[in-house]
Image (cartoon, rainbow, N blue to C red):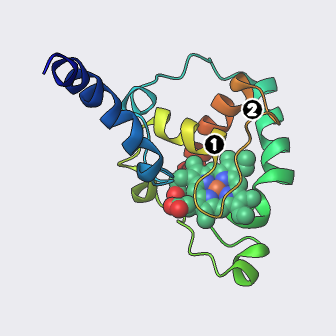
Amino acid sequence: MLTSLLLLPLLLLLAPVQQQPAATPASPVAIPAEALHMLNPVKPTPEGMAQAKKIFGYDCAMCHGTTGNGKGDMVADLKLNLKDWTNPESLKNRTDGELYYIITNGQGQMPGENGRAKPEQIWNMVVLVRSFSAH
Ligand code: HEC
């Protein structure tokens, strides 16, 4: 009797831990709430934007297109259906934190910049991605 009383709380403690492996992998689209609301801490400078454009040219344009229109060279091969960022509607419902998170960690068929670019450079790329609709 005494042992079962002691075992019950122990089992309750263990239960959620044991369920975790079954719950992973988490959906790649899931973005943590705190990441969604991150604000861009970087003030864009001409140098920062030039650097972001350079990185975009060799890490992103092959999919998203040099103008951000979603028609890069790899789109056909990978059968991608990318948003046209020259249309202001396309990123209207996304927060900066969300874009930062996706550029850092990747999403679906997109590889993340994590480890390749510094946080400051990624924030500049968020600004760059948004700027494609301004022309
Ligand atoms: C291999 C092709 C590929 C490359 C390279 C790539 N992306 Fe993507 N990107 C995608 C795909 C596919 C999605 C949509 C992902 C999803 O919704 O599952 C996406 C989504 C995004 C989004 C979210 C908004 C949206 O339009 O869906 C941002 C922001 C983004 N990419 C920025 C970048 C940046 C910046 C780079 C370069 C550092 C980059 N991407 C490189 C394929 C790519």
Which residue is painted at 81% across and 52% down in the image?
59
Picture quarter with ligand 1: bottom right
Residue 85 in view here: no
Which residue is at the front of the view, 5 or 42?
Answer: 5
* Residue 120 x %, y %: 70, 22
Which residue is at the front of the view, 115 or 24?
Answer: 24
**Looking at the image, is 97 positioned above or below residue 63?**
above
Q: Quadrant of the N terminus?
A: top left
* Residue 57 x %, y %: 83, 52
**In terms of image quadrants, where is residue 34?**
top left
- Kind of residue sitting beneath label 1: Asn
Tell me: 49 left or right of 99.
right
**Looking at the image, is 52 positioned above or below residue 7?**
below
* Residue 62 x %, y %: 79, 65
What residue sits right under mark 2 in the picture? 49
Which residue is painted at 24% across and 29% down in the image?
12
Which residue is painted at 16% across and 16% down in the image?
2
- Kind of residue sitting beneath label 2: Met
User: Could you tell me which secondary element the residue under label 1 belongs to?
Assistant: helix
* Residue 53 x %, y %: 79, 43
Query: Pointer 2: residues within 10 angstroms few (<14), some, or many (20+)?
Result: some
Residue 111 in view here: yes
Tags 2 and 1 touching, CB below 8 Å: no
- Which residue is most to the front? 1
User: Could you tell me which secondary element the residue under label 2 belongs to?
Assistant: helix
Which residue is at the front of the view, 1 or 78?
Answer: 1
